[in-house]
Amino acid sequence: HGIDISKVKSTRLVDEEGIIERGKRYQVDMIEEDGVTYVFEIKNYADDSALEQLALRKRILEGAGKKVKLFVVSNLIEEKTKLRAEKEGVTVISGHVLEAEE
């Protein structure tokens, strides 16, 4: 995906604008390059909660005027979560997709 993974930094994001809760801190893995903030949710197993975490961080960063691109990086991801992520414009990088049970 053209991203130098060695540049990903784990940092604290502070909700300065009060988008969610003024002053609240969130852990975030990200890179800021060429005017874009790339945010990563890195999980062994990705489900809908990973997307919720990304959406929260995106709201805070966009509230601060940043252009944001989201990624889920996981060993395993549920099929329904992968489809939802792609529909929402999140790039999914995963080793295995767990098919939905019937």
Image (cartoon, rainbow, N blue to C red):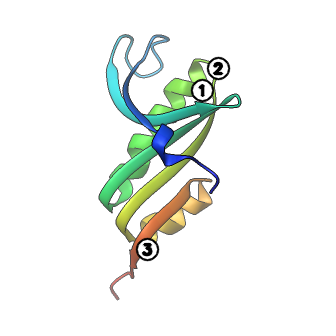
Residue contact at pointers 1 and 2, CB within 8 angstroms: yes
Query: How crowded is the residue under tag 1: few (<14 C-alpha within 10 Å), some, or many (20+)?
Result: few
Q: Position of residue 53 (x, y in %)?
A: 39, 41
94 shown above or below 17 = below
Q: Could you tell me how far apart the alpha carbons at marks 3 and 2 are, in whole angstroms?
A: 32 Å
- Report the side of 48 relative to 16 (left or right): left
> Looking at the rendered structure, which numbered label has been put on residue 52?
none
Q: Position of residue 15 (x, y in %)?
A: 42, 17
Q: Quadrant of residue 22?
A: top left
Residue type indicated by callout 1:
Glu
- Dot 1 or dot 3: first in sequence order is 1
**Image quadrant in which the C terminus is located:** bottom left
37 shown above or below 23 = below
Residue type indicated by callout 2:
Gly
Q: Position of residue 23 (x, y in %)?
A: 35, 11
Query: How crowded is the residue under tag 2: few (<14 C-alpha within 10 Å), some, or many (20+)?
Result: few
Which residue is label 3 attached to?
79
- Dot 3 or dot 2: first in sequence order is 2
Q: Position of residue 30 (x, y in %)?
A: 48, 36
Q: Secondary structure at mark 3?
A: helix
> Looking at the rendered structure, which numbered label has been put on residue 65?
2
* Residue at 38% over, 61% down: 74
* Residue at 40% over, 47% down: 41
Q: Secondary structure at mark 1?
A: helix
Which residue is label 1 attached to?
62
